[in-house]
Image (tube, helix red, strand yellow):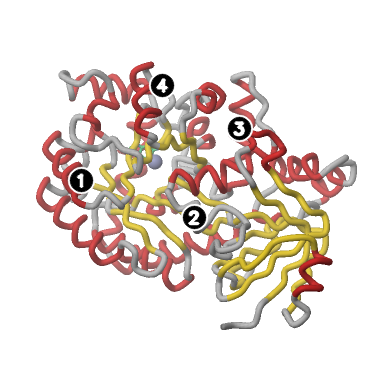
Amino acid sequence: MTTARLHLGQTLSFDGSPFEDGLGAVRHDRHGALLVQDGHIAAIGPAETLKAAHPQADRVDHGTALIVPGLIDAHAHYPQTRIIASWGKRLIDWLNSYTFPEEMRFGDPAYAAEVASAYLDLLLANGTTSVCSYCTIHPASVDALFDAAAARNMRVFAGKTCMDRNAPDGLRDTVQSAHDDSLALLERWHGRGRAGYVITPRFSPTSTPEQLEALGALWAAHPDCLMQTHLSEQTDEIAWVRDLFPEARDYLDTYEQHGLLGARGLYGHAIHLEPRERDWLRETGAALVHCPTSNTFIGSGLFDMDGLMAEGQRVALATDTGGGSSFSMLRTMAAAYEIGQLRGRALHAAELLWLGTQGSARALHAADRIGNLAPGLEADFTVLDLASTPAIAQRSARAGDIWEALFATIMLGDDRAIAATYVAGARAAPA
Ligand code: GUN
Ligand code: ZN
């Protein structure tokens, strides 16, 4: 047993979903405390109560900063770290011009290791404690990310991206190698430390039906793994899928027919959905991953958060680095707010924070471990400075309540708002 440590500050945690239960689902303590022991949360409550109950505990006083669950990015491509903010293309041209040439470099394990380490350090600096990332077709790119995550003790989900067509020479696998390499990686990493393996067909255009079938069979044989892919991001992409799969009823059907639709499935973007697709995604309990900075940056469209939430869909929030234009989940929440506004629904600060913590944790089937501040959960948490820049400080000085102050940091904040990031109870950033 390590010595217990008591973190003092404002605390914010969830008893439920603000989308379902409003602000009654959120617990805020202006003088709160979080008791951490052996990498887990032992207690959360009013500072005076926990100080009296645990007089021996070490104390870390975060002042007026706000302690929130560690931010969780439910969809990213770590190999695109160095091509983020590439100009002027829409999805298919963007993939061919920027993404595929960069992903080719990950055939070099040393390059993969270098980017993986730098990427996870960027996440920690931005208050993100967990990510679900695509790697490249190269198995060593998966080892690189899981090794870098283990070195930081981060709970990371990732998988080998599979593509056996419509990708350049040197960036394609085969039906057999995609299956066998994914299986070997899954056996090496799934459940090792904090690693979770994710079966990862990139999207229907870059997999033959035979490859989708082989990965569906792999998922059926390992149903406790997550599966991630892309769905209905741009209209040109959907038209291409229609040409490539003339028998399919719609885009989702190209996955469904090959065993790639399920409750542990994560479907990135999901913007231009048909009614049948919405029904089946909801019925199966699959998760839709909203990637707002990517959707505006690549010009994809406006995710229907309000309608999908009202239908009872499972929704997570993500950067989609490097189609997304930021590593920061605060910037991502701000973009989700703006897309909501364009669709006529102002998301509340509590809803935005919930999406980037609990929403993502639930989608990743990891809410029993991460995504909240509650006894028994792993002690991944982020400390937000609610006055991190002069612009934010002058706005939050006017704030009437915690929500106004938090909203100012969501809309105006970035990595400067991250006073500290803790992973499994240990301070991980700033270094
Ligand atoms: N669809 C298929 N691959 C990708 C990718 O790397 N990024 C985005 N945004 N969409 C994709
Ligand atoms: Zn993506």
| Foreground: disc 4 or disc 1 | 1
Mark earlier in primary sequence (1, 2): 1
Q: Is residue 287 above or below residue 306?
A: below
Q: Quadrant of ligand 2?
A: top left
**Left or right: 182, with 174 as reference point:** right
User: Closer to the N terminus: mark 4 or mark 2?
Assistant: 4
The earlier-in-sequence mark between 4 and 3 is 3
Instruction: Quickly name the residue at label 4.
Output: 272
Q: CA distance from mark 4 to mark 1?
A: 28 Å
Instruction: Say which mark, if any, is on residue 368.
Output: 2
* Residue highlighted by disc 3: 20
Q: CA distance from mark 3 to mark 1?
A: 32 Å
Residue 111 seen in render = no
Q: Secondary structure at mark 4?
A: loop
> What numbered label is drawn on residue 220?
1
Whether pointer 4 and pointer 3 mark residues with C-beta atoms closer than 8 Å, the reply is no
Of the image marks 3 and 1, the number of the one nearer the N terminus: 3
Query: Closer to us: mark 4 or mark 2?
Result: 2
